[in-house]
């Protein structure tokens, strides 16, 4: 893949907000007016103090001055809230879009992505990397435009009220804080940010692997080595994080020093102007007070680089996932499933060792076919090919006589449902987990699906029924109940071809018989392919095939 420079990366990130321009414009207006109100509070507070001291510059009544300050303060708070609300609404909407794009890319790439990236890296990209973009979308785009517009107004005011020399000095200070410091920080920390994101992926992968292999670790007594590896990985991550924080502190100190020096020089310049009678001393004091509070927008920009370093590193990784080379393109034809035919199908992951060899069989609605075979025989690979997660090396797969390569992924997803060996349930309500299969389903449809999967009675026995929260560790459901909830999703999706991988592996004999009976009822307008090691599950099939070393035998 072509290496992406920073400007191309920013262009890619900005490309996502084209439909949110109206939110940005409104947020920028609220932010600019809010900052100008903040500066005006200082100005009118100074006028109020001078009024109390019997120094009347603008001849404004004291009560009016106090009213202006109070109203400005209220409006400043209100506009700040609106600005932040719009920024974060836009940001989190875009994060949802980014995650959707990533999932879409992962589906298109099939198993290729897992050959090139670890699960820990993919999870980090989906979670941590995506979330770090929030800094760019919520705290960078609008603050940048707010700083430009606000400081432009302030510079013009100083040029008109005091002197253009005074406004030129303010401009230089703003550019140093809001432009020079962020650019220097990013240049100095670009490689460190990329290295940190990579190490974060490694750390995530180490913990994930340790969790998945916990039984093997305990059995072979590798606890000390595992803990040591996790500790070293975490220490390395903390070391990189400390380096980033230390550099951020250095640049923050430089920013504060620039503000302090600017204030001192402004006082000196003002003294010269007063001495030459170029400006009223009271007006200069008021102007200085306004200038001292006008650094807010550019200070907000100078504090961004440490987070932007992470955001750009994350965006680069997300871009690489989204634009990775795809094994095969998605088709554009749709179909309404009636039959499937596999002809002379062969497949190899590495181009040498064939996992499947010259597979032939067909199925149509009203039929159940069973696949039997040992682990590693190629059963799961065959399902990937039927879902177009992988592409056959030889032979072809057709649905309704249409080559699978010509079919759209949306159409495949609509017509085919896979029940895999591992059922994942989100930490949310039962209803939420069911609606993943059919977002517009009503409660009656969900209940019907639960009945078919033999999990209805369990759900109805719970206090909150469909609103019951599934624990993060799923401890409030047994393995069998979890499997049946997954099966209920299959029934709710109601597609025409069901691919069922070990559908009753964790179900007791009684519930297995009821589920198998339901599948026999379902087959009248569906085609079902069952993979199972259990003879009882295979018994409902119209035809049983045995898969041995990639060869299908009837």
Image: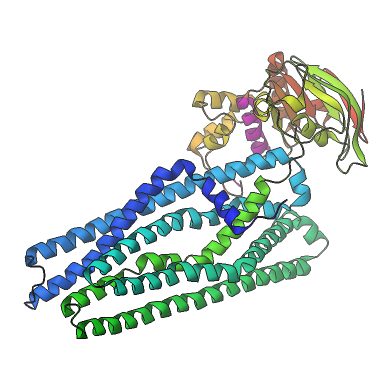
Q: Is residue 233 left or right of residue 171?
A: right
Image position of 220 with respect to 399: above or below: below
Coloring applied to the structure:
rainbow
Q: Is residue 116 left or right of residue 458?
A: right
Residue 374 lies in what quarter of the image?
top right
Q: Could you tell me which residue is drawn at 49 percent across and 45 percent down?
A: 17
Q: Which of 230 and 221 is in front in this view?
A: 230
Q: Could you tell me which residue is drawn at 31 percent across and 79 percent down?
A: 266
Image position of 546 with respect to 522: above or below: below
Residue 490 lies in what quarter of the image?
top right
What predominant SS class does the magenta segment belong to? helix
**Residue 424 at least partly seen:** no
Residue 301 location, x and y as percent? 44, 65
**Residue 84 at least partly seen:** yes
Q: Is residue 276 left or right of residue 488?
A: left
Residue 313 location, x and y as percent? 61, 59
Residue 515 location, x and y as percent? 70, 25
In magenta stretch: residue 485: yes
Image position of 515 with respect to 3: above or below: above
* Quadrant where the image shows the C terminus: top right
* Label total for image: 0
Q: Could you tell me which residue is drawn at 57 percent across and 34 percent down?
A: 436
Q: Nearer the viewer, residue 125 or 28?
A: 28
Q: Give the range drawn in magenta.
A: 475-493
In magenta stretch: residue 92: no
Residue 240 location, x and y as percent? 63, 71
């Amino acid at each position: 893949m072509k290496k992406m420079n920073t400007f191309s990366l920013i262009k890619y990130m900005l490309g996502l907000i084209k439909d949110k321009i109206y939110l940005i414009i409104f947020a920028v207006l609220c932010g600019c007016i809010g900052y100008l109100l903040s500066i005006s509070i200082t100005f009118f507070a100074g006028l109020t103090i001078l009024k109390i001291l019997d120094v009347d510059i603008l001849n404004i009544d004291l009560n009016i001055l106090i009213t202006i300050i109070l109203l400005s303060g209220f409006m400043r708070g209100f506009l700040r809230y609106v600005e932040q609300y719009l920024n974060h609404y836009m940001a989190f909407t875009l994060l949802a879009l980014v995650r959707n794009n990533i999932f879409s890319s992962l589906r298109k790439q099939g198993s290729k992505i897992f050959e090139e990236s670890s699960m820990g890296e993919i999870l980090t990209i989906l979670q941590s990397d995506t979330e770090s973009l929030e800094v760019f979308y919520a705290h960078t785009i609008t603050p940048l435009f707010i700083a430009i517009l606000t400081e432009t107004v302030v510079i013009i005011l100083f040029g008109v009220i005091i002197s253009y020399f005074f406004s030129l000095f303010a401009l230089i200070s703003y550019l140093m804080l809001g432009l020079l410091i962020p650019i220097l920080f990013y240049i100095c920390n670009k490689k460190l940010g990329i290295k940190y994101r990579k190490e974060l992926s490694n750390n995530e992968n180490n913990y994930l692997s340790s969790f998945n292999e916990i039984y093997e670790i305990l059995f072979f007594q590798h606890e000390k080595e595992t803990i040591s590896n996790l500790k070293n990985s975490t220490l390395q991550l903390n070391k990189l994080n400390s380096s980033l924080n230390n550099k951020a502190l250095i640049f923050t100190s430089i920013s504060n020093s620039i503000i302090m020096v600017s204030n001192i020089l402004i006082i000196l310049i003002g003294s010269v102007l007063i001495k030459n009678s170029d400006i009223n001393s009271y007006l200069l004091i008021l102007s200085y007070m306004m200038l001292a509070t006008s650094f807010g927008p550019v200070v907000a920009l100078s504090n961004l680089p440490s987070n932007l370093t992470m955001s750009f590193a994350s965006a680069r990784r997300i871009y690489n996932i989204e634009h990775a080379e795809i094994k095969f393109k998605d088709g554009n034809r749709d179909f309404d499933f009636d039959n499937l035919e596999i002809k002379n199908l062969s497949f190899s992951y590495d181009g040498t060792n064939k996992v499947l060899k010259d597979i032939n069989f067909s199925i149509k609605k009203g039929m159940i076919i069973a696949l039997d075979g040992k682990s590693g025989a190629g059963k799961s690979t065959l399902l990937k090919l039927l879902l177009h997660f992988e592409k056959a090396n030889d032979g072809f797969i057709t649905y309704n006589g249409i080559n699978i390569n010509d079919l759209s992924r949306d159409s495949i997803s609509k017509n085919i449902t896979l029940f895999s060996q591992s059922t994942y349930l989100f930490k949310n309500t039962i209803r939420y987990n069911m609606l993943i299969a059919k977002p517009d389903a009503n409660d009656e449809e969900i209940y019907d699906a639960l009945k078919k999967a033999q999990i209805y009675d369990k759900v109805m026995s719970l206090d909150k029924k469909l609103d019951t929260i599934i624990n993060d560790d799923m401890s409030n459901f047994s393995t069998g109940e979890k499997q049946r909830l997954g099966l209920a999703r299959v029934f709710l999706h109601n597609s025409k071809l069901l691919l069922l991988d070990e559908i009753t592996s964790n179900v007791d004999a009684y519930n297995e018989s009821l589920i198998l009976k339901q599948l026999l009822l379902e087959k009248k307008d569906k085609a079902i392919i069952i993979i199972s090691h259990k003879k009882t599950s295979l018994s409902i099939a119209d035809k049983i095939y045995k898969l041995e070393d990639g060869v299908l035998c009837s």
